[in-house]
Amino acid sequence: APRVLNASAGWRLTSTETGTSGEVKRKPGYRASARGAVLRLSTLQSGAQRVQVGFLASPRSRATAALTCEAGCTCARLELSAHDSRGVSTTRFSDPHAAVAAGEQPCELALRLTSDREDFKLIALHVAEDAR
């Protein structure tokens, strides 16, 4: 599970979802649908690293979000789209994204919704040391 530092109004932790046939399935994650909602995360790691964001992608969704680095961490802005044209809902992972946290402090990230009234669901944050 991602290490959440804080969540602005609009983000909520969910643990289950109801399928199309009414069955309840365990599917944890953080969900928001209001433009500007911010979820602050920690990689729990300092130095050079690569992060991958895992999120729900669906053919019905037009939700978008942006991941940025904060608090002594640097990286390029990463744009994410929850739309999947393949006709199925699935977990999608972003390509590995380089980030560098200065000193001994872990990298802090902000995931900000850039769409409005469209559900975006964060499922995972994978972090690996960048060997380069």
Image (tube, rainbow, N blue to C red):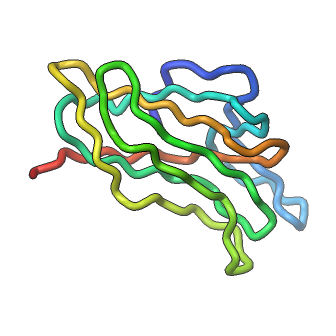
Residue 30: x, y in percent? 64, 37
**Picture layout, residue 10 above or below residue 104:** below
Which of 75 and 86 lies nearest the eye of the viewer?
75
**Among the 4 quarters of the image, the one containing residue 23:** bottom right
At 80% from the left and 48% from the top, the residue drawn is 118
**How many numbered discs?**
0
Residue 55 located left or right of residue 101: right
Q: Is residue 78 left or right of residue 88?
A: left
Determine whether 64 is above or below 85 in the image. Answer: above
Q: Residue furthest front?
A: 76
- At x 75% / y 70%, what residue is drawn? 59
In the rendered view, does 23 fall on the left or right side of 123? Answer: right
On the rendered structure, is 70 left or right of 6? left
Residue 116 location (% of width, % of height): 80, 42
- Considering every residue shown, the one lying at the far bottom of the view is 86
Q: Residue 13's x, y, as percent?
A: 67, 32
Percent of width and height locating residue 100:
23, 35
Residue at screen point 70% across, 39% down: 31
Residue drawn 35% across and 47% down? Answer: 51
- Please name whichever residue, 51 or 98, is drawn nearer the observer in this view of the structure: 98
Say which quarter of the image contains residue 88: bottom right
